[in-house]
Amino acid sequence: MKKIIALVSAAALLSAFAMPTMAAPKKSAEEVCKTRAEKKQIAADKMDEFVKSCVEKHNKSHHKAKHNAPAN
């Protein structure tokens, strides 16, 4: 009986921490690319070009992933 209570308690605790992360709003491709540029320390004069190419790559790979997904 104690094992069942411990298991249910652990599951409840894990779900309590998992729920806020699942509900977090997704960042746009541009925001993700700007963050990458900052981490890579891209120069300010090349930032726009980097973000533009990053967004294009992101959209292209995202578009492929949607079309290659199996139909349910």
Image (spheres, rainbow, N blue to C red):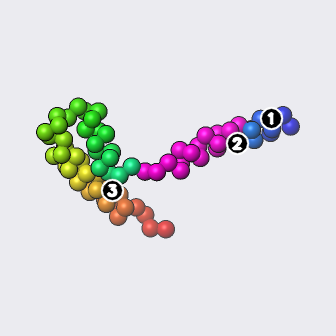
Amino acid type shown at disc 3:
His
What residue did someone put label 2 on? Answer: 12
Q: Mark 3 or mark 2: which is in front?
A: 2
- Residue underneath mark 1: 3
Tell me the SS state at disc 2: helix
In this orientation, which residue lies closer to the viewer: 8 or 46? 46
Residue neighbourhood size for the residue with mark 3, other residues' Cα within 10 Å, grouped as few (<14), some (14–19), many (≥20): few
Task: Identify the residue at image location x=14%, y=40%.
Answer: 46
Which SS class for mark 1? Answer: helix
Q: Outermost residue, bottom direction?
A: 72
Q: Is residue 41 magenta?
A: no
The part of the chain drawn in magenta is 10-26
Q: Are marks 1 and 3 in contact (CB under 8 Å)?
A: no
CA separation, marks 3 and 2?
34 Å
Amino acid type, callout 1: Lys
Q: Choose top left, top right, bottom left or bottom right for residue 7.
A: top right
Q: Residues within 10 Å of mark 1 (few under 14, many from 20)?
A: few
Residue, disc 3: 62
Tell me if 13 is positioned left or right of 59 in this view: right
Pointer 3 or 2: first along the chain: 2
Residue 37, percent from left and from top: 25, 38
Quarter holding the N terminus? Answer: top right
Residue 41, how many percent across, how many down? Answer: 23, 31
- x, y (%) of residue 47? 19, 41
**Which label lies toward us, 2 or 1?**
2
Q: Amino acid at mark 2?
A: Ala
In three-dimensional space, the C-alpha distance between marks 1 and 3, rounded to whole angstroms, equals: 44 Å
Which secondary structure lies at badge 3?
helix
Dot placed on the residue nearer the N-terminal end, 2 or 1: 1
Seen as rendered, the residue at the extreme right is: 1
Residue at the spot 16% in from the left edge and 46% down from the top edge: 49
Residue at horizontal 32 percent and vertical 47 percent from the top: 31
